[in-house]
Amino acid sequence: MKDCILEMKNITKEYPGVKALDNVNLQIKRAGIHALVGENGAGKSTLMNILSGTIPYNEYSGQIFYNNQECKFQKIHDSENLGIVIIHQELALIPELTIAENMFLGNERKNKFGVIDWNETFHRADIAMKAVGLNENTHSLIKDIGTGKQQLVEIAKAISKDVKLLILDEPTSSLNDEDSRMLLDMLIRFKKEKGITSIIITHKLQEVAYVADEITVLRDGMTIETIDSANHCINEERIIKGMVGRELEDRYPQREHKISNEIMFEARNWTVYHPIYTEKCVVDNINFFVRKGEVVGFSGLQGAGRTELAKSLFGRSYGSHISGQEFIANKEVFLKSSRDAIVNGLAYVTEDRKTDGLILSETISKNTTLARMEKIADKRGVLDIAKENMVAKDYVKAMKTKTPSVLQKVGNLSGGNQQKVLLSKWMFAEPDVLFLDEPTRGIDVGAKYEIYSIINDMVSQGKSVVMISSDLTELLGMCDRIYVMNEGKITGEFSAEEATQEKIMSTILKSDCTPVDRR
């Protein structure tokens, strides 16, 4: 291939009971943007972990050629020394350290005496920050800046390592549309101005069509095809066909709307302050409700207060100085803990499955029954392991989770399959009201359809679903009503018939809108 910066030949990687990569071949052109797409479990992240040295040479078979030289990376520093830098989906930043400290952690700037040169550290951090267009004080703590800015810090960190080949694994999964477009435009700028080559893994196919010069499709651990997209005329349907092996005619499953007049959940005058900065109001006098059999969506920018609202309602799992009322089935409830919430039929599927939702070191079986372990215990409180495994097998089958066994550790599953285990956990809890916070983040289009079908099944049984999502098309495709939040307040409300992307975005950016009471 003309001016090829990277070639991976016959890469094969096996885990116990599963072949993650099966003779994969990949070629990357210099100073281009190459997208790697495929369903969850297709092997995308595994392939990039091999390239970066996260998975060492002796744990896979095949060859890697970088700048025409064969490489046998044993650790991540081996690849970084050659200018290959990977940014994982879960940001590797330490909240209590400054931006500059995070940027040079493990790559410290030292003087001739071996002591950290802080002036040089902050100076070089400033240069890297300007390169990514982030106007932030490098003395600021990571915990005090938003998710979008943290993503830019990771990229600035890569720039500081003199990156030549930048690998980004789901870089926009936690970003809104505006921040996502800014990041993609930055990759294009890096390509043109600095000659940086990028490999991007993403499930947002509109981003692939927008930014990629070439697209490689993986399916079941094998290379299916590489598509030339230099003129950006490849549409999403064409990419999906390669990913799933068939046309996907409808992104959202059809649902017969059987919404009751009965209000299943309601919050009145709900106000929440920040748990640390207790003078900061993050949820400001919120009023909303969801009927039996209804899917209600919450839209808004990052930091609008949607997650804080959901977590605080779920047994006061977030916040301080919480005030207001909660009603389930028209009965006021006082939920002082997550256990209280579960017992009263309320469930919350977190946006951060790896930190708050699952125990990665435990099996699928253990995680599936975690929220309601008493359901598989005898009268003495002793867990029935056989019953636990049987329950997990039923949910694996229902969710179409890809795993060799329910005894597989959840940490070994792909992101999409981890999400299915998380949903199984809360389905097993049998809630009447389910809060879903970014339920399809980092999940391929086929797995999304399966999760949407599960949501439809729930509401058809008379359950109620509240869906928080940064994906406007998802909200428009799934919800009966959509609330819009901005700066801790509800600034608008739309029925499914009224809602459009333009109307929602316009309302997001206005703070003086008053929602209509649609009882």
Image: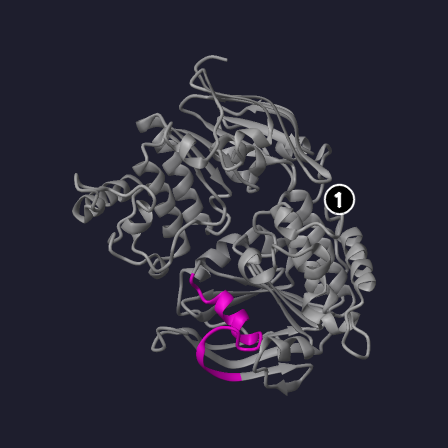
Q: Which quadrant of the view contains residue 354?
A: bottom right
Instruction: Identify the residue at image location x=40%, y=70%.
Output: 512
Which sits in the foreground, 194 or 114? Answer: 114
Which sits in the foreground, 235 or 347? Answer: 347
> Dividing the image into 4 quarters, which one contains the C terminus?
bottom right
The image shows residue 57 at horizontal and vertical percentages of 53, 29
Instruction: Identify the residue at image location x=73%, y=52%.
Output: 407
The image shows residue 141 at horizontal and vertical percentages of 31, 58
Res. 367 in view? yes
The image shows residue 326 at horizontal and vertical percentages of 58, 82
Residue under pointer 1: 404
Q: Magenta segment: does it hold 316?
A: yes
**In the rendered image, the vertical position of residue 248 relative to residue 238, given as above or below:** below
The image shows residue 133 at horizontal and vertical percentages of 29, 43
Which sits in the foreground, 186 or 314? Answer: 314
Instruction: Identify the residue at image location x=71%, y=78%.
Output: 262
User: Could you tell me which secondary element the residue under label 1 belongs to?
Assistant: loop
**In the rendered image, the vertical position of residue 303 relative to residue 135, given as above or below:** below
Res. 251 in view? no
Q: Which quadrant of the view contains residue 352?
A: bottom right
Which sits in the foreground, 35 or 405? Answer: 405
**Viewed as shown, does residue 182 lie left or right of 219?**
left
Q: Which quadrant of the view contains residue 44?
A: top right
Q: Residues within 10 Å of mark 1 (few under 14, many from 20)?
A: few
**Viewed as shown, does residue 480 lie left or right of 321?**
right
For the record, the magenta segment spans 303-324
Coloured how? one colour
**Viewed as shown, does residue 141 lie left or right of 21?**
left
